[in-house]
Image (cartoon, grey):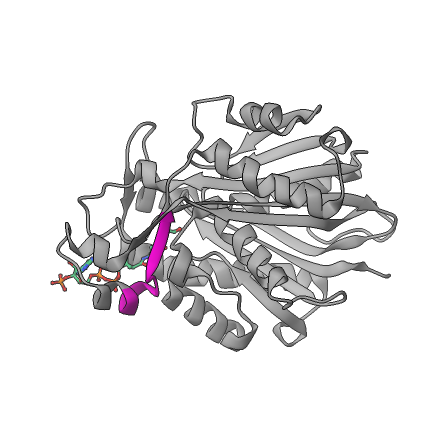
């Protein structure tokens, strides 16, 4: 049921935060060891530099601390923690490290839907609110630098480390989530994947081709469920994988690039963190106001896709 039912318990985002990996790595740095150039990477991907370093849990805690303080909440007020990550520090138990370090007294679990994971988690957090939780902390955190083959010029320039977090609080009435879509296509799973303990395997050209289509499909479903069109969007916050994918998806949706949140030039692709980082940067730049319709849309390995339409500040009817 992707449209929020009238009268159901909804949620609003009351706090947000983001952090990037510790060390700046420029395209020129990469060109020292790889057969590549700043010109190729900028032209083909839109990335000028990326930030790497830190642990998934460590980055998650930094972003979440900011989100909690902006929401004005002490850790004991959080009812559940969802950590979206495709690069946990441990096979299991990374969400619980975050829970311990933040001093949360609640259940915690991980979601892995690759780069779509943050939107998957946000939708699931709304489900927890509908089941009686009052406040859910949702974090997207990834350290893709740990699963990147730094000798492979086809993938090394793309990936990086970051975390973004939001606090979702229950509200009377429908709240902010107007429509959503979670999708996956396992028949395409060999196009983008990583073994446990291995590095990223990707058929870049085919992923690119499908990415534009599945982002569009998912976005259109969410907007239809929300009862809006692309003209009604104040901002689109897309997964930051390649500026050319973002541009093509916006063009096909009929959204001009002035209405797109873009961070890829300085973040690279940070998977689960990509959308909450871009959302946080847009909020910090004053690009989002109460009543605005915001579209979050991502795609990723698996292959997965996910989108959500939010009415910022919550719907009034
Ligand atoms: O979260 C989702 C993760 N993944 C993605 O979203 C990836 C989607 N795909 C892409 O973003 C693009 O396909 C890439 C950025 C990965 C590649 O761009 P492209 O325009 O599709 O390039 P290509 O793979 O068709 O390669 C064109 C040429 C090739 O050389 P030849 O065969 O034409 O001589 C590559 O070997 O560029 C070469 N190449 C490079 N040259 C310099 C590939 N990587 C590099 C590089 N520097 N880093």
One can see residue 1 in this view: no
Quick check: 146 above or below 40?
above
Asked where in the image residue 311 lies, by quadrant, the reply is bottom right
Asked where in the image residue 310 lies, by quadrant, the reply is bottom right
Quick check: 111 above or below 71?
above
At a point 45% along the width and 30% down the height, the residue shown is 88
Answer whether residue 288 is magenta in the image.
no
Image location of residue 46, percent across then percent down? 35, 65
Q: Residue 86 or 278: which is nearer the viewer?
A: 278
Image location of residue 43, percent across then percent down? 28, 69
| Count of marks, rendered view | 0
Q: Horizontal placement of 186 versus 105: left or right?
A: left
At a point 61% along the width and 68% down the height, the residue shown is 235
Quadrant location of ligand 1? bottom left
At a point 42% along the width and 45% down the height, the residue shown is 21
Identify the magenta region: 42-51
Q: Horizontal placement of 108 versus 210: left or right?
A: right
For the C terminus, the quadrant is bottom right
Quick check: 97 above or below 49?
above
């Amino acid at each position: 049921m992707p449209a929020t039912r009238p009268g159901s318990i909804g949620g609003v985002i009351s706090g947000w935060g983001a952090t990037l990996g510790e060390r700046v790595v420029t395209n020129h740095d990469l060109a020292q060891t790889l057969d590549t150039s700043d010109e190729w990477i900028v032209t083909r991907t839109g990335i000028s530099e990326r930030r790497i370093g830190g642990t998934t849990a460590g980055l998650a805690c930094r972003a979440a601390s900011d989100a909690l303080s902006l929401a004005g909440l002490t850790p004991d007020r959080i009812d559940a923690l969802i950590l979206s990550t495709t690069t946990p520090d441990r096979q299991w138990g990374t969400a619980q490290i975050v829970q311990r370090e933040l001093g949360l007294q609640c259940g915690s679990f991980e979601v892995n839907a690759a780069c779509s994971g943050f939107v998957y988690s946000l939708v699931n957090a709304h489900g927890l609110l509908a089941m009686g939780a009052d406040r859910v902390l949702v974090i997207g955190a990834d350290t893709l630098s740990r699963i990147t083959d730094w000798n492979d010029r086809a993938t090394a320039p793309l990936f990086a480390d970051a975390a973004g977090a939001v606090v979702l609080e229950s509200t009377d009435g429908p709240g902010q989530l107007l429509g959503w879509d979670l999708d996956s296509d396992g028949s395409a799973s060999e196009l983008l994947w990583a073994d446990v303990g291995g590095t990223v395997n990707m058929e870049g050209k085919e992923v690119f081709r499908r990415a534009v289509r599945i982002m569009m499909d998912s976005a259109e479903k969410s907007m239809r469920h929300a009862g809006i069109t692309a003209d009604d969007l104040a901002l689109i916050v897309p997964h930051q994988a390649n500026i050319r994918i973002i541009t093509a998806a916006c063009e096909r949706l009929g959204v001009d690039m002035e209405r797109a949140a873009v961070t890829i030039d300085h973040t690279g692709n940070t998977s689960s963190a990509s959308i909450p980082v871009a959302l946080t940067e847009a909020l910090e730049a004053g690009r989002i106001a109460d009543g605005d319709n915001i579209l979050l849309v991502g795609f990723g390995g698996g292959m997965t896709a996910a989108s959500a339409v939010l009415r910022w500040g919550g719907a009034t009817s």
